[in-house]
Image (cartoon, rainbow, N blue to C red):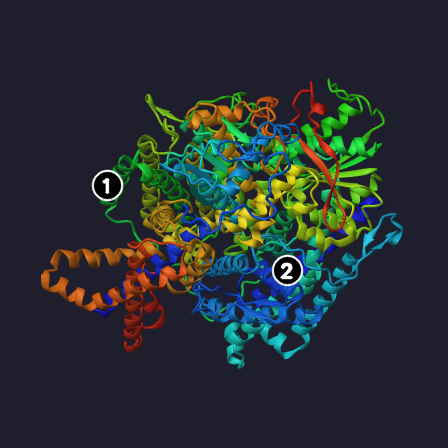
Amino acid sequence: MRSHSISRSRPALALVCGLALVAAACGSDTKTSNTAAPATTAAPAGTDAPAGTDAATASGCGSVDASFDKTGGTGAGRFIADLTCAGTKPLKAEGDPIKIGFANPEGDPNGSFPEFSAAAQATADYINNELGGLGADIQKGIPGRPIDLKVCKMAITPDDSQRCANELLTDNPMMVFSSINFFGNQFPIYQAAGTPVIVITPITVGDFTSPNVYAIGGGGGCLGVHTGLIEFATTQFTPKKIAVPWADTPPGVVCYYDLENKPINVLNGSVAGTGKRAGSMPDLTSIGVPVKPATPDVTPQVTEVLDFKPDVIVFSAQGSDCWNFVDGLGRLGWTPDQIPLVLSGSCLDFDAMKAAGDLAKGIYFVGAPGAVLQDPATIADPRDSFEAGIYQKKMIEYGLDPADLNKGFSTQGATGLLSLWETASQIVVGGGTLDSKALADSYAATTGQHLFGSTPLSCSTAPTPYVAVCNSEVAATQWDGKALQPVGGVFTGKDLVAGTEITPGP
Amino acid sequence: MNNVIFFLLLGLGIGSLYSMLGAGLVIVYRGSGVINFAQGAFAMYGVFTFDEAHRNGYIRLPWVDILPTSWLNIPVTIKLSDKGIPTLPAFAVAVAMAVLIGLAVHFFVFRPLRTAPPLGKVIGSLGVMLYLQGVAQLNFGGSGRQPGNILPDGVYKNFLGLGKAFPKGAVWAVVVALIIGVALHALFHLTRFGLATRAAAGNEKGAVLLGYSPQLLAALNWVIASVLATVAAIVVGPITGSLTPVGLSALVVASLGAALIGRLKSVMVAVWGGLALGAVQSLLGFWSSKDWFPTFLRSGVREVVPLVAICLVLFIRGKKLPIRGTVEERRLPLAPYPVRIKQHLIAWSIIVVSASFLFEGSGKRTVFALALTTSLVAAIIMLSMVVITGYVGQISLAQMSLAGAAAFIMARMMANGSTTTSNPFPVSGPGLPWPIAALIGVLAAIVVGVIVGLPAVRIRGVQLAVVTVAFAISLQSLYFENASLTGLSAGAPANVRSAHFFGIDLKSIGDKGLSDRPEFTIFVLVVLILCALLVANLRRNGTGRRFLAVRANERAAAAAGINVSRTKLLAFAISAGIAGIGGVVLGFKQNDVSSANFVYQASLAYLAFAYLGGITSINGAIVGGLLAPAGVIAVSSNYFFHGTNIDRYTTVFGGIGLIVTAVANPTGIAPSLQPLFQHFGRWLRKARSAEWLAAVRRLGPTAAIGAALGAGIWPLRVDSYSWFWMPLLGAVLAVFIRSSVMQSRAKRARPTARPVLAAAGQAPSAVEVK
């Protein structure tokens, strides 16, 4: 009898261990909103309406100041008026919830970004409790339907990427957000289901080129940022020698050869282009130095860059790789005063920049010109100031951990949900019916459409093959040791690749 | 020439990190016979501890608080200061932490595993790595850290007249590595402790007879290795830039290269080897950007260096490499003789086919359809591990790479220059029909498998494991991620067209986008059944008996007339073929394949699941498949426990699970479940109301208490939870704990009646090798 009981213990033990390991390999969760509205929903300090939106209307809301549309994109004035109105007269969503999927990498030691979904959830709660839900007409006080955000937490594996797509589709979502996905193998599943996908942070080639996908992330991934880096570096510093260390990842290869190396060749005339600046810098030479992500020691690559004696260095990579590179430059005696360094907006990491001290002071950044992380009082543009105030107040009110507030992915999570809300409202206000197709059509038709905390969306003008890229305008800033200072206005470098063939490799 | 010298010297910086980690690997191997895959994780936890104390003034202890309620807490954090502490005290804190980790790892993991077979030790070290990564993610955050540099900043402007700036930190790193190497060399050659360690490494029984405690020596060596890893990461780590829990752990491969150059014996040679590896990697990195460098080699040439070093050393000096002596070494569990195959197949088939139709278009439960096919595919790949590891005893950490070789070749053979929605860049290829393309893919995997197996002719055990993991990394860099060979631009996945069979479309994705087509599930099931039959017949015929003979004792097998080399290569070929079939089916399941499917970590994970399931049996592979990432049990866990935040701790629990399994239940789940099912089956057939009542009386109170705890405690712990499943979990855990305690008592009370070897059931029996 005892021998039986002992033999039973091992399987049970093994099963428990097995379950634990399974959970380790694949942590996932589908989470629905359970956050109650905060007790006070009055307009917070710092979110006062910009001048021009205070005239009373029949519904008690401020009038729409269309002048904001000129700088903030179509609908900016309406957006500001709506949020201002909701600040004083919150409108609660009514009716059956609309399910929205949100696939996000969480809980994997290889990469975990819980702030992405936390900010999205906080924004959904804000929308449900104050902005009337999806399809609301704030100006007329007509509520829309609440968002039921279905978050699928995924491990960073191709299998889990597809699992999340299947899991989210079982909820029949009206739309799915893909926060950041390293594989791009989820798109065929969504395409077969006819479910449109909003990509918040485009990084894979599928993010740029898949149909029924709308990459709204500021800067539009490498189409906007990489061409923008070359545009900025060549106009700001008029160099003769430009060094381009590049992220040696599969998408990075295309981003470098097609959107950095080719524009340089267009500028020096070795590649024919139809842009205005084609052939305007015949003396321009360059060096490309591949940098693998998480390279243990980048000193050899840095040495190669500095040996070229460039007039300017441009580099685009993911956060930690950027600062590894800057650290490597510093170890070889480089300072930003000697040779200007222009990094992509994806390198922005305020902790790393502060830790780098003088080494970071003077570095330029080119990317989405969002200002939501800055102190609203220090922002000159009234729309930017207003949106920064909204973000910083509402996220905390609706439960975002203050430690996550200043993370880039938090702002992008909020931007994604507010973009959806704005688009849904426009559909309903315009007399349409809110469904998947209407949302997809609305995004696909955008041309200079306002986007919260970012540059306007223009999905309809995306060039082939980057048909999913909706947001390729960028702006430049410079880190002064304490804050980012704007350098010029919004611009795009897409003109540098106009009339050229795609060049995916060497 | 100046450039060549300069870049060689420049690589010494990172080489010093390889050196010190490699020296730690040698020390651990000498001390306890373990190839410590967690050496990089030791370094990671140490440097994170240093940085946290220095920057924020906290010590984060190496465990997590799974009950962070307002009234019941497990202490995890010690606050030292509001603003961080100076460098030297922070360094001391990190060293103390390294001592703690070293001792804990020895006493809780590798002391119990001291007589385990090499595979058990590999699994144990993987468990430690997973645990430390999980704890670090929870305690320090998942993002990278940029610890401050404690070495001098600045540059030598014209270093050695080479005309380039050279970082002072790299020079100091090399100096520190050499000093540590010399010190350790002296320790192991001039002190009684060192001589005793070397004696124990050569002959543990002899050391025991001389009055030394091998376990005490092992404990001290673990402490030295842990401290060394921490010091290395603190001193040299900053030159690697931002440090992440996974990134530092991955440095273990290059460090293994250094350790093997030192023949797992000489610390000093390992230090020189690490420096050389860093130098050569740096030079190749420089050369690879030159126009004259072959394009197809540019991708991943740096990663190949450790492989070349490892293979050269092992192939040239394989038989001279020390196999550490042990007092006693258990063997792998018995490979059960397959019985009642037809009944098993019928039962599994009925379950799978029923489930495939049950879950098709079934609302939220549809997720189980994909989970089912994921598990079936994983089971096929794990069957390949049953052959190579379970039957022949060779540890291969490259099975997913072999699967990848087949999948990528098949995709290329199918390619016809057209584009897809996920890949706008055309891929050229002959456009072969799927059966021919799949066959070519599997054949390619077999060829690659035989190449991987060549070193096994001369080496075995953990050394072979190291070769295979290096091979896996190289294949990934040189082929899967090499656009010039795959024709895939921008990391686009390789498209795999769906299969057709006599007019039946075998695509995996249905019209609604969900991966729930029963036709595809049945297709995968048929492939799995064929593979299982192949393995079962292999186990029952002469080839299988030769495999087991080689596993049991190579010399004895050779004496019995078995060609050991040929047998091993045959096993590698068969195993690679099955893995290749798995890769091909994986391609059909996903409709495309990318390098991310076949990273070496995937091989490690699959081996771990196969081990959990039972590495020596066919049922073990099937259970392993159920446990696989995104498989049935994972999806069930997500489905039933949604709304909880248990998943935060899954990596930690996963690591603990692996360790506990390696220590307490090396046979895995499937073989252990067999008697359980038989027992329950008999009980259910015979049980009458009285027996049911007795069982309820015996277990009921415990289950009720567990359920109450589940209902009462879990709400304090989790954000939201299921009122049904959480009490049920509490009840099951309570019954499990009660059962364990009772059995432990019974075990202690029972006199040992049989000799040790027989009791352990490890002696090769006539049944095993007949």
On the rendered structure, is A185 left or right of A341? left
The answer, for residue B573, to whether it is visible in the render is no
Q: Amino acid at mark 1?
A: Ile
User: Between disc 2 and disc 1, whose residue precedes?
Assistant: 2
Q: Amino acid at mark 2?
A: Gly
State which quadrant residue B318 falls in.
bottom right
The mark tally for this picture is 2
Please check whether the numbered discs 2 and 1 fall on a single chain.
yes
Position of residue A405 measured from the top left corner of the image (x, y, whole percent):
58, 50
Quadrant, the N terminus of chain A: bottom left
Position of residue B639 measured from the top left corner of the image (x, y, whole percent):
35, 47
Frontmost residue, A421 versus A352: A421
Quadrant, the C terminus of chain A: top right
Rate crowding at label 1 as few (under 14), some (14 to 19) or many (20 or more) other CA atoms within 10 Å: few
Q: Write down the residue under mark 2.
A: B22
Q: Residue at x 10, y 64 (%)?
A: B690
Position of residue B61 measured from the top left corner of the image (x, y, whole percent):
54, 67
Q: Is residue B760 above or below residue A77?
A: below
Q: Chain of mark 2?
A: B
Q: Are marks 2 and 1 in contact (CB under 8 Å)?
A: no
Q: Kindly state the secondary structure of the residue where label 2 is placed.
A: helix
Frontmost residue, A44 versus B552: A44
Q: Residue at x 61, y 38 (%)?
A: A453
Rate crowding at label 2 as few (under 14), some (14 to 19) or many (20 or more) other CA atoms within 10 Å: many
Q: What label sits on residue B346 in the rendered view? A: 1
Q: Kindly state the secondary structure of the residue where label 1 is placed.
A: helix
State which quadrant residue B560 falls in.
bottom left
Label 2 and label 1: CA atoms lie apart by 51 Å
On the rendered structure, is B482 left or right of B6? left
Q: Is residue A215 above or below residue B227?
A: above
Q: What label sits on residue B190 in the rendered view? A: none
